[in-house]
Structure formats: C-alpha cells, structure tokens
Image: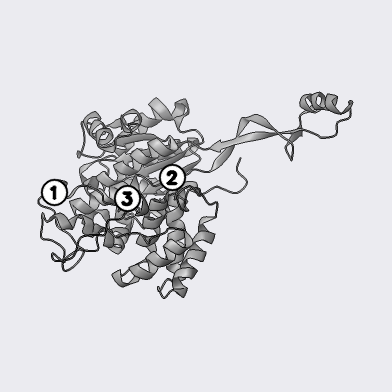
Amino acid sequence: MAGAGGRGRGISVEPAVLAARFAGALHEAGVPVGPDRAARFAAALRLIPPDTRDRLYWTARTTLASDSTQLPPFDAVFARIFGDDQPPVDLADSRGDPTAPPLPNVPSETRPTPPDDRPADRAPSGSGTHSGAGAGAPGDPRAVPALASSAERLQHTAFAELSDVEIEAVRRVVREVVLATPRRRTRRSRASTRNGERIDVRKTVRNARKTGGDPVELVHRRRRRRPRPLVLLCDVSGSMEPYTRVFLALLHGSVAGARAEAFVFATRLTRLTRPLARRDPDLALARAASAAPDWSGGTRLAGSLHRFLDDYGRRGLARGAVVVILSDGWAQDEPSEVALQMARLRRLAYRIVWINPRKAAPGFAPKVGGMAAALPYCDAFVSGHSLAALSEVAAAVSFDRKGSN
C-alpha cells in the first residue's frame, strides 16, 4: 500500500498490521473497537487500496466507527497517527439541525471528501434516507450527506433493500473494489541474481569478462509470473434486476482495474468489455445498457454459456482463467443442458466462482434446476448480496490452489 499517510508521504504496511495497530490505538482512546472490526478494516484495505489519505480515512471510519459519539476520538487518533495538523472535518456535522452554525473554513486539502460528494441539488426528488431522526424529508438536500453516517446499513444491507440514493453511494464504493486473481508462471523468463530455476550461462559468461574471466556471480533465470485472466458473466434478466446496478459497477471497476473481460446475458450473450472500458462510469453504463437489447428479459443460461464457450472460451479467453458468474440460477433451459455447458467450462477454466445474491436468504437451498445443475462444477459459491459480502467474493476470486503453476 502506498500513499496512506499524509500528503507527500507514503507507507508500506501490510493491511493486517495497519488494521491491528490503528484499532489498538482507537481502543486505547476509548473507541470500542474489537478484533471483528479490525478484521473487517483489514479486509476493506485489501478491497480498496488506500492510495490517498482521504480514501484511507473513509475506509477506516466506515468499518471502525459505529456511533457519532466515537467520531471525535476517532478523528483525533487518525490525525495523530497520519500526521495531519487538524482533525478531518465531517461534512455531516450539522445533519438534522437547521440552526447549526456553518462548517469552519478549513482548506479543502486538509479534510477528506465524503463518500457521497454529489451536489445536493442533484438528489432525486423522490428518494428518502435511512439515517434516523433529524434527517431531511424525501427530497431534502440534507438526505445526501446524511449517508456518510449510515456505514452499518450500507455495509450489511442487501443491495435490493437500499434506496436509490444509497445505491449510488454503494456503486461508487464497488467501482473501487479490486478483484485480484492468483498469479501463474508464464513461458517467458527473466534474469535473477538471487535465485532462479536455471543458470543463465550466456549472461554469466558475458559478465565474467568484467572479472578477468572468472564467473564471480552466477546469473539465474526464473519464469515470469502474471495474474490469471478474469472473466465475469453477469445475469441481467428480470429476476436479477435488484442487484444488476451494483454488479455492473463491479464489472466496470474490474474491466478498468484488472483488465477483466465482461459479459452480460439474459436471453442472449453480449460482450461489454469495450463499452465498460471508458473512464466515465455513467457513460460506460449507458453504453453497456444500449449494447444489451435483452435487458430484464428471461434467462437462457445454457444458451449463453454455449455461445461464450464457442465464440470466446475455446479461443483462449477462458483457458486458465478465473470465471465469475453472477446469477441466481433461475434459467429457462433444461438442467441437463446447463450441466453440459458447465462441464465444458470446467475443463477450460482454472476456477469458477458463482455469485448468487439469493444465497443470503434464510433457508436458501440450491434446488432450482439451473443452480442445482451448475453447482457441482463450481469451485466457490458465495452470495455477494451486500458490501460486506463482497469481501468473500474477493477472497474466492484470489484463492490459489496449492501446487499450481
């Protein structure tokens, strides 16, 4: 991690070490931070690299502070550890109090930017807030900055239960999620003076000319390592509509950050890698929506997998890749057809991760035909229904089998 310190300074600390030390300092200051919150903060640091002080502040605050009374000691400890002259200013200090004095005139570079920095006049007129008493009525501009204190709700509430304003806040966070695949050895090699798989005789002899012909230092070669390809297949049928908006933000962030290949499917398969490669998220998602004419239609899971394997998978896109399927498994295809295509995918992919938001429902069991047929071919089966559940998704994608190359 770099850039987690103050301006002009960087740190290189393991997320677990940083989380443990910062949580310990908060505990000494009277903030009730336990091991569970410290573990959540460490997981969040792996999902959202703290390359700026603002991002580190909000990642720490949303995972470690659960009550407004904890904010003064939290800000003091954060400023002391990360070397800021003034404690960060909470832009929601006046929430719910129309007579509250204006915020102090603090230079913008000394205070973090809140997660939802959208101008108040752009708040949807029909949206509400779940931040408790004192927040504005639907359409009140104070409803947008009030989201800064609703960390617990945004973290653990299913995406389908969030309001439109909260969904926008969540999408901004999800776009920063890093899905890192395990690394594999390539055919190419590079020189290594410390260790390697074999001696580079040519370079060793060439270097020996500088020492009178004596090979003082042996030069080795070792095979390069690079991340495995990442392929995401997202179900955009009607049954997945409550989760599609957030999952598309995950696809957009993965295409931009991990160079993933992105596809959506309902009654047909559509490749969205190029439309989602744009930096502007709104423009990227608008182009993606126009590229998939079967949005919110039925689900042809087997047919979509068949098209992916024939047109892209067998040509190398799925070979040795981590394939992530985001679907509830409610397919119109015969289960035997779904099993056939999943078996084909299993022979090509390094790992198959299935994300089903219905898995988090009480009493859930994969008894639906498509889901039941696909499950035996999956390496991981997770829900991904909330921000907190995305840490399990990231862990499933980055898992590396022992002894793999």
Type of residue at label 2?
Leu
Of residues 237 and 223, the one nearer the viewer is 223
Distance of mark 1 from mark 3, alpha carbons? Answer: 26 Å
Q: Secondary structure at mark 1?
A: loop
Question: To which residue does mark 1 refer?
Answer: 124
Distance of mark 3 from mark 2, alpha carbons? Answer: 31 Å
Q: Secondary structure at mark 3?
A: helix
User: From what the image shows, is residue 258 above or below residue 164?
Assistant: above
Q: Secondary structure at mark 2?
A: loop
3 and 2 marks in contact (CB < 8 Å): no
Q: Residue 190 in the image: state x and y as whole percent.
A: 67, 31
Task: Tell me which residue sits at (20%, 40%) in the image.
Answer: 296
Specify the quadrant that holds the C terminus: top right
Type of residue at label 3?
Ser
Q: Closer to us: mark 1 or mark 3?
A: 3
Question: To which residue does mark 3 refer?
Answer: 108
Residue 404 disc label:
none
Of residues 263 and 73, the one nearer the viewer is 73
* Residue 378 relative to residue 214: left or right: left
Q: Closer to us: mark 3 or mark 2?
A: 3
Residue 179 disc label:
2
User: From what the image shows, is residue 67 above or below residue 2?
Assistant: below
Distance of mark 1 from mark 2, alpha carbons? Answer: 31 Å
Q: Residue 99 in the image: state x and y as whole percent.
A: 13, 66
Q: Earlier in the sequence, mark 3 or mark 2?
A: 3
Residue 119 shows in the view: yes
Type of residue at label 1?
Pro
Local crowd size for mark 1, using a 10 Å CA cut-off: few (<14), some (14–19), many (≥20): some
Residue 329 shows in the view: no
Q: Residue 120 in the image: state x and y as whole percent.
A: 17, 50
Q: Earlier in the sequence, mark 1 or mark 3?
A: 3
Q: Earlier in the sequence, mark 1 or mark 2?
A: 1
